[in-house]
Image: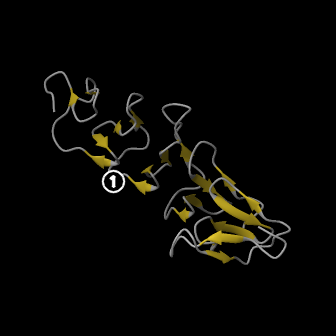
Amino acid sequence: QDKHGVWTLDWSASWSEVKKTDLDPASFTLLRCALKDKNGIYNLRDGNKISSDVKNYVEIEGSEYAKDAKTIYFRNTPLSGADLKTFTVMPPASVEETSIYAKDSIHVYWFGNVIEGADPKTFAYSKRDNSFATDKSALFYGGEKVKGSIDLKTFVPLEDDSYIKDKKHVS
């Protein structure tokens, strides 16, 4: 930012190129994951407007999720079909991490992507390794349903996270 405008790195070209944005320098603010001025909220990477709802736009603490009065965003991309009224970000496993999971009354999200088949009412992730999660009927790893028969009550990720065990198996 200078007296002539707000500049951003052109991530589509190379790190050494900058481009001038249309943002208002007098009201410009750098948010954690976005850019803001009196006219809107803009994508941090390319300066494109993502929301005109300056009054209601908030970044959800401890995550890369944000919302305004009509839309939920992950890394500045709208989450299609997310239920704004019931959307919550699940707290991270530790204070050093950002939250990667969120849910609403319909879906569970991992890095902004719907985890197909996950039940939002019973979904919980492993505090030891948040790449693993369970719901009432399945085990998930990295946002994907794990195939096979796993005892969800006794399942534990092992030290190197390449293996898991339950009361009958080590996989």
Q: Percent from the top left, x then y, of residue 164?
A: 23, 30
* Residue 150 vs residue 48, the one in the foreground: 48
> Which image quadrant for residue 6?
bottom right
Within the image, what quadrant is residue 146 found in? top left
Q: Seen in the image, is 124 located left or right of residue 140?
A: right
Q: Position of residue 154 (x, y in %)?
A: 26, 23
Percent position of residue 121, x then y: 43, 40
- Is the N terminus in the top left, top right, bottom left or bottom right quadrant? bottom right
> What residue lies at 13% left-to-right and 23% top-to-bottom?
168
Judged left or right of residue 40, residue 48 is left
Instruction: Work out which residue is located at the far front of the displayed protein and give it.
Output: 16
Compared to residue 81, the image places residue 126 above or below, namely above
Residue ID for mark 1: 116
Name the colouring of the figure: secondary structure
At mark 1, the secondary structure is loop
The residue positioned 78% from the left and 74% from the top of the image is 5
* Among the 4 quarters of the image, the one containing residue 20: bottom right
Q: Position of residue 171 (x, y in %)?
A: 16, 33
Q: Is residue 93 visible?
A: yes
